[in-house]
Amino acid sequence: MHDLIIDGESNVPPVNSELHHIPLNFDEPDEFRTEVCSGTSCIGTLLFNGTNDFSFENLSCLAGSCNLNTNVMYTNLYQGFWFTWDPGPFHYKITEDGAHLVLIIIASEDNLAIYRTDFLATEEFEDSVFQIYPNPVENQLFMQFSNDVVAETIRIYDLQGRLIHIETPTNTDLIEIDTSSLRTGLYFVTVIDDGGRASTERFVKN
């Protein structure tokens, strides 16, 4: 999550030792899951009411809590967004911002939850620092890095922003990733270097 806008006011989530990011997962075919801290998961079953509308058949949150007061307060605000008094449907739209996808969920009274496929605390490279091929790919994706890049983490996200692969490379001369199990579609591969900077490229799985 990148922002929660309630009554027109921006509420950027905290980033600290307990909270790095707030995930939102749409698990096939219709399961919803999100949490602020471990033990605060909200889980529900989605009902898609139209092209860009959904509601919940059921939604419940675990009784856990964060340790830091800042995170406790944000958990209450965030869960309040989903447990709205208005039972009307949520509306969503997906847009692109450079190499990243942006998911905007609109609740009652035009309150917004905004999610991206990158993280708030990650500084981006000005230019791409790696190349991928072949693209489209079938079974093996190769990654070639610039000479001065030390990649610490490689992450692959699907079109919904779900993290589906993560690895720590032992070298960055040439990396080979098995993509045979991926479903056909568009994916994003993000490299985070030893300085915390990120670079993202997209690829298509045939």
Image (tube, rainbow, N blue to C red):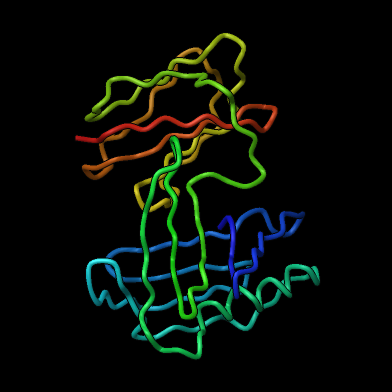
Identity of the residue furthest to the top in this view: 147
Q: Residue at x 60, y 70 (%)?
A: 8
Locate the N terminus by quadrant. Answer: bottom right
Question: Is 80 located above or below residue 97 in the figure?
Answer: below
Identity of the residue furthest to the front in this view: 8
Q: Residue at x 22, y 73 (%)?
A: 50
Q: Position of residue 26 (x, y in %)?
A: 38, 63
Left or right position of 120 against 205:
right
Query: In the depicted view, which residue is nearer to us: 145 or 93?
Result: 93
Q: Residue at x 34, y 39 (%)?
A: 187
Q: Position of residue 56 (x, y in %)?
A: 36, 81
Question: Is 192 located above or below residue 107 in the figure?
Answer: above
**How many marks on residues?**
0
Query: In the depicted view, which residue is nearer to us: 177 or 11?
Result: 11
Locate the C terminus by quadrant. Answer: top left
Q: Position of residue 155 (x, y in %)?
A: 48, 38
Question: Is 195 located above or below residue 166 in the figure?
Answer: above
Left or right position of 63 against 18:
left
Question: Is 7 located above or below residue 102 in the figure?
Answer: below
User: Which quadrant would residue 6 be assigned to in this image?
Assistant: bottom right
Q: Residue at x 37, y 65 (%)?
A: 92
Left or right position of 188 against 15:
left
